[in-house]
Image (cartoon, rainbow, N blue to C red):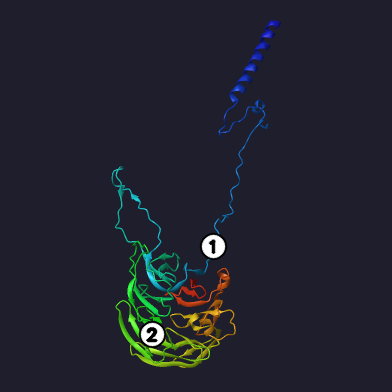
Amino acid sequence: MSKRNLKLLIIALVTIVIVTFGYLYFSNSGTVGQTGTTTGTNFFSQFFPTSKPATQTTDTIPPADISGFELNSTTETPIVKLNKVSSMPIAGYGIFMKERFKDVPTVIPVEQIDLTSSPQSTTTETTKPTPPPTEFVPALRYVDRATGNIYQTFADKIDERKFSETIIPAVRESYLANSGESVIMRYLKSDGITIESFIGSLPKEFLGADTTGGNEISGIFLPENVTDVSISPNSSKIFYLFNTGNTTVGITLDPLTNKKSQVFDSSFTEWTSFWPNKNIITLTSKPSANVPGYMYAINPDRKDFNKILGGINGLTTLMSPDGKLVLYGNNNLSLSVYNVNTREINTLGIQTLPEKCVWNKTSDVIYCAVPKFIETKEYPDSWYMGETSFSDELWKINISDGRTTIISDMVSTNGGEDIDTIKLTLDEGENYLFFVNKKDSYLWKLNLK
């Protein structure tokens, strides 16, 4: 082969090699793979697959947690069993059942599509509206000691609201009757001696109606210097005592009809009353440490007068709802239970006053506020006169088997505030125990369940 032809062959081969390498380079440079990521521009990597690209970034995806563990972002709040109800000192309170709307989730109507009609037609299902469900729950009304204004709240949801604006300054004592629709307010006249007792009718509330709290109260006055008042178990009537000359007279009154009936009179004028059931009103001589006390019972229909207990110094009493048992205390504040039928006495081994206790409706359990410490003084005189004040615990006493349980150490559970407990009352379902602190007259509530 001539030199000329050899040169031409070498040039042709070099040209073919250059074209081939150029084609491979430019046809693979910057292409996108199937996964959507760039394969790189390293030329030698096209021929040496084991070679790594010059630069390559990969997003790191953490492995999925298959343990099932979920972080609990909510903290469980402990239930506070003891709560202050009123925001002011009160003169008295009453419990009744009140209707309210239930809290239910709102249901949004769903548009229904009629598949048998044309694609453009839709129908909305309409149903007859049903009234929202309601419930009856315990509610309270109480009287502001300073102004005589009445406030109210539900027992389970403390939401204090003013109910009336009738001003009666410096009310010393008050009672609610007729399921919270009547109020008795007792106060001193301007002379500082004469006791006035006012009975007022409260306006009815209607479910769902707006309450402004500006209600006015109208009513009548009882005779001056009424010495004692009791409310019947169903709160429909009141019993009151007043002195006329040298005689004490006892009257029952229906506040709604103003119907009165005299059921008692006595030449002895120092009595305290209690109305445990419809057939019995008890009268106990006002107690003193060094004076024997006596307890009697009146049937308001028959107007009879029968002795129950007597000859006990410092006697204070509290009859059970069934009328068969009497919780009583003496001048040592020692509590005992007297069986009216068998005349047996059972000493409970607890020191307190019966008026710091309340019976349950089946007459087999007593809730009592028991002082942690009792000074050596004359009782109950020193406590009545305010010379002695107690710091209480709440006890539950089972009369049938004698078991006693401390259900609340009130000092340690309310931030250190001492409570000297009076005016104890259970709601109808016995879910709550209400009482007043004698030290400052604030209303309290204890959840029992």
The mark lying in front, picked from 2 and 1, is 2
Residue closest to the eye, 5 or 228:
228
Residue closest to the eye, 443 or 278:
443
Q: Residue at x 53, y 91 (%)?
A: 290
Location of residue 95 by image quarter: bottom left
Location of residue 37 by image quarter: top right
- Residue beneath label 2, please? 241
Q: Secondary structure at mark 1?
A: loop
Q: Position of residue 187 (x, y in %)?
A: 41, 76
Mark sitting on residue 77: 1
Residue closest to the eye, 29 or 411:
411
Residue closest to the eye, 268 or 420:
268
Q: Is residue 328 visible?
A: yes
* Between discs 2 and 1, the one toward the N terminus: 1
Q: Position of residue 175 (x, y in %)?
A: 40, 76
Location of residue 93 by image quarter: bottom left
Q: Amino acid at mark 2?
A: Leu
Q: Amino acid at mark 1?
A: Thr
Mark 2 in CB contact with mark 1 (< 8 angstroms): no
| C-alpha distance separating marks 2 and 1 | 49 Å
**Classed neighbour count for the residue bearing mark 1: other residues with Cα under 10 Å, few (<14), some (14–19), many (≥20):** few
Mark sitting on residue 275: none
